[in-house]
Amino acid sequence: MTPNSYLDPAALSKIGRLDLRAKLIVEGFMSGMHRSPFHGFSVEFAQYRGYVPGDDTKHIDWRVYAKSGRYTVKQFEEETNLTAHILIDASGSMAYRSSKAADKLNKLEYAKLLTACLSHLILGQSDAAAVGILDTGLREFVEPSTKEMHLQRICGVLERTEASSESNIGGVMSDMAVRMKRRGIVMLISDLFDEPEKLFKAVSRLRHRGQEVVVFHLLDETELSFPFEGQVRFRGLEGDVEAICRPRMLRELYLKEMEDFILQVKTGCRRNQADYVQINTRTPMDVALSAYLVRRMRVAAGRSGR
């Protein structure tokens, strides 16, 4: 079996261990990349200085040489063991999935696999990964580490995590911001079915403390398209609420509400300089990850070229 064949959802669903699935996915799409998609997370350009024998020639700025005839080298400020905190919403709504097919993941299962993949990438470049499981509070927390075996510990916690309770994602993130002493990256994976203003307040607090923030907005296909027909019973996943209705009569209103909600989240993230990434759970994991990381590499390349 070729590496790429493991990216097929049906094949992946037969692999029990989360860490193995993450490694297969990451190795599959990384095979086409020539450098780490996290290049630029741990190293920031600081200033130029004159070239001295022994410097790595790859850091020579040839554009400066073409203009001045002088060899100059870009100096970088390294932040070793940069920490990435990956926070997963494990509230009740994350248990939703529209299909009972064996290879169809609910939102929480997708979030757990995404977390395992991101952790594998981060640990692979010798940075530290930490994982938090959130609902109304911080349910579980895996302390940051750079050790290769850390992925197994993270995946052990992820595999026993189930969706339950209501959500207070913004409140928990605000509390966690105080715990994050070093500048790093915070990645939230959630359907964001919470009070948006609480989320934006938390993002603002994290940004003021020097954290980079990435919001992965995870939604099921039916939450985006509302394709239901006939008479349908809807049951709440965060409370004992049921409603029977004819979706066709509500579709236009629902889609408008969802559009407004997504726009509100996008706008709030942009206002607080957080990266917003919407992911449909029907999207293959390697496609979702590589699309985001390639885009990130291009942004980092553009910054270094200025």
Image (tube, rainbow, N blue to C red):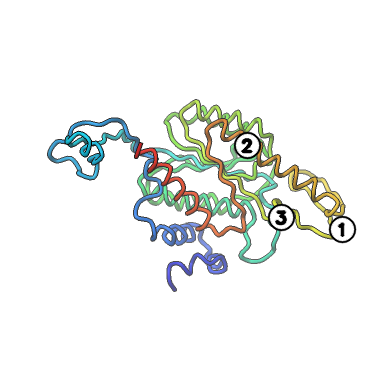
Q: In the rendered view of the protein, which quadrant contains the C terminus?
A: top left
Residue receiving disc 2:
169
Q: Amino acid at mark 3?
A: Thr
Residue 219 is situated, as x and y percent measured from the top left of the image, at 65, 50
Q: Nearer the viewer, residue 279 or 57?
A: 57
The N terminus lies in quadrant = bottom left
Few, some or many C-alpha atoms within 10 Å of disc 2 (few <14, some 14-19, many ≥20)? many
What type is the residue that disc 2 sits on? Ile
Count every numbered label the image shows and give the total. Answer: 3
Q: Are marks 2 and 1 in contact (CB under 8 Å)?
A: no
Q: Amino acid at mark 1?
A: Gln
Binning the other alpha carbons within 10 Å of mark 1 as few (below 14), some (14 to 19) or many (20 upward) gives few
Residue 14 visible in the current orientation: yes
| Residue 129, quarter of the rendered image | top left
- The residue that appears at 21% across and 35% down in the rendered structure is 72
Estimate how packed mark 3 is, as few (under 14), some (14 to 19) or many (20 or more) residues with alpha carbons within 10 Å.
some
Residue 222, disc:
3
Secondary structure type for disc 2:
helix
Q: Name the residue that disc number 1 marks.
A: 231
Label 1 – label 3 distance at C-alpha: 16 Å
Labels 2 and 1: the sequence-earlier one? 2
Residue 129 against residue 103 in the figure, above or below: above
Choose the circle earlier in sequence order: 1 or 3: 3
User: What separation in Å lies between label 3 and label 2 (alpha carbons)?
Assistant: 23 Å
Farthest residue, direction bottom: 1
Please state the horizontal and vertical placement of residue 6, each as a whole percent of the image: 48, 67
* Vertical arrangement, residue 269 with respect to residue 11, above or below: above
Q: State the residue at coordinates (63%, 52%).
A: 107
Q: Nearer the viewer, mark 2 or mark 1?
A: 1
Residue at 53% in and 65% down: 12
Q: Could you tell which of marks 3 and 2 lies nearer the N-terminus?
A: 2
Spot occupied by residue 256 in the image (x, y as percentages of width and height): 75, 44
